[in-house]
Image (cartoon, grey):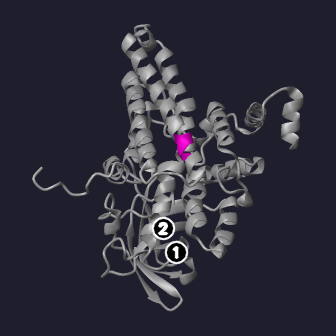
């Protein structure tokens, strides 16, 4: 019996209840009480410093990478992960905005397809706070990712890469990049792609932030001019990068959702309820309207369904029992639910909604600044495969529908 189980037995509490109390107590003493104010209008340097410090705090408590294997500092059960994310959201903890790609996308890729040397180099680096970006999409290859044209040619012990990437989240702060490039221009497009780990400090890398409608510059363009990447930074076999990329996209579309679902339920829905209980200029509260109550009940039901889907996906992933379209189902469900919920918040509050023009940089996609939240929600229905792409994957891989129309129909 572990010390935690012994203590739980001594108090008559179950281990999960004991763990929830532990996380709640930790949140009370470690979440900066003024973080929202401090991160509103924060400079880039302040944002990066805060994100690194928050990651160090989570790592020190064992909360930074609970989904990783035990040998790399994780090993937390799915039930405990759910409790952890519920409490972090309920206690209004900041989000690991800059660490998201590293601890989810990069880690999942390295654990599934990386060499032992690559894992031993980069997983400890991620735990030390290295920031990663994802160089997949291009101006002419977004939804049709396999149409990418960035090239990588072998030159001795290096690949020389030239091309352009776009919509790379946080690339202006990144230390490393997950990069797809074409290594065989004559092969069918899904068979001539290779997967690389690129040092963002390499000569020839030029990062340009993109100004968004929200006023933020979360996304970036990456220009690559004869960038040299060591052969040892090739992930998987040469020309087999498309298969490796599916591991990354699977994590982006599915396994990251456990935390996001709890954030949406514990933070986003709570913000929505508060918006509905505030009196409007006429003194009436939106929650007194039966139509609003019906919408709230619908959202509550949908969020409950999302949580169950996410938990089931992660549990089956741990048993290697997921289906070919499961991650796409969860990604589609979450992204469109997020969009509907923030749209409703903007409809209730209008342009005059509190904080509409300002929100903290270390917050989530649901903050109660509804107009900005709604604009930001489109980040989820487009990147990682648009909603249309997810429906195609679900139809073809999940339902077995034909890729081309049947003749005569």
Callout 2 secondary element: helix
Q: Is residue 178 left or right of residue 291?
A: right
Q: Quadrant of the N terminus?
A: top right
Residue 333, given in percent of the width and then of the height, sits at: 42, 39
The residue where tag 1 is placed is: 236
Q: State the image quarter where residue 231 is shown.
A: bottom right
Q: Main secondary structure of the magenta part?
A: helix
> Would you call the spot at circle 1 few (<14 residues within 10 Å), some (14-19), or many (20 or more)?
many
Label placed on residue 381: none
Can residue 311 be found in the magenta stretch?
yes
| Most distant residue in the left direction | 408
Name the residue: 69% across, 59% down.
127
Callout 1 secondary element: loop
Question: Which sits earlier in the primary sequence, circle 2 or circle 1?
Answer: 1
- Above or below residue 218? Residue 92 is above
- Above or below residue 268? Residue 407 is below
Residue 2, given in percent of the width and then of the height, sits at: 86, 44
Q: Nearer the viewer, residue 385 or 187?
A: 187
Q: Label 1 near label 2: C-beta < 8 Å?
A: yes
Q: From mark 2 to mark 1, how far is it between C-alphas?
A: 7 Å
The residue where tag 2 is placed is: 244
- Above or below residue 361? Residue 286 is above
Boundaries of the magenta span: 310-314
């Amino acid at each position: 019996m572990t010390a935690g189980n012994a203590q739980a037995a001594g108090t008559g509490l179950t281990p999960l209840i004991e763990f929830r109390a532990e996380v709640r107590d930790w949140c009370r003493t470690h979440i900066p009480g003024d973080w929202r104010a401090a991160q509103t209008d924060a400079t880039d340097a302040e944002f990066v410093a805060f994100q690194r410090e928050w990651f160090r705090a989570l790592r020190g408590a064992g909360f930074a990478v609970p989904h990783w294997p035990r040998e790399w500092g994780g090993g937390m059960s799915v039930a405990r992960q759910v409790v952890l994310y519920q409490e972090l959201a309920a206690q209004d903890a900041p989000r690991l905005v800059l660490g998201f790609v590293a601890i989810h996308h990069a880690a999942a890729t390295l654990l599934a397809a990386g060499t032992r040397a690559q894992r031993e180099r980069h997983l400890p680096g991620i735990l030390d706070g290295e920031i990663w970006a994802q160089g997949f999409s291009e101006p002419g290859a977004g939804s049709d990712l396999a149409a990418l044209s960035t090239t990588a040619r072998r030159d001795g012990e290096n690949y020389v890469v030239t091309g352009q990437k776009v919509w790379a989240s946080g690339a202006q702060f990144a230390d490393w990049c997950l990069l797809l490039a074409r290594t065989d221009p004559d092969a069918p497009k899904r068979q001539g792609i290779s997967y690389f780990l690129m040092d963002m400090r390499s000569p020839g890398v030029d990062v340009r932030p993109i100004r968004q409608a929200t006023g933020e510059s979360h996304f970036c363009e990456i220009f690559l001019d004869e960038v040299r990447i060591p052969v040892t930074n090739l992930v998987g076999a040469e020309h087999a990068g498309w298969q490796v990329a599916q591991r990354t996209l699977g994590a982006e579309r599915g396994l990251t959702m456990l935390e996001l679902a709890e954030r949406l339920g514990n933070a986003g829905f709570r913000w929505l309820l508060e918006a509905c209980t505030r009196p409007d200029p006429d003194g009436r509260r939106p929650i007194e309207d039966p139509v609003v109550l019906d919408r709230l009940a619908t959202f509550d039901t949908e969020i409950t369904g999302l949580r169950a889907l996410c938990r089931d996906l992660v549990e089956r992933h741990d048993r290697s029992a997921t289906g070919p379209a499961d991650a796409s189902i969860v990604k589609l469900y979450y992204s469109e639910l997020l969009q509907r919920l923030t749209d409703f918040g903007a409809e209730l509050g209008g342009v005059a909604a509190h904080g509409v023009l300002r929100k903290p940089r270390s917050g989530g996609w649901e903050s109660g600044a509804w107009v900005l939240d709604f604009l930001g929600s489109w980040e989820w229905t487009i990147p990682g495969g648009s909603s249309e792409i997810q429906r195609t994957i679900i139809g073809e891989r999940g339902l077995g529908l034909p890729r081309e129309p049947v003749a005569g129909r």
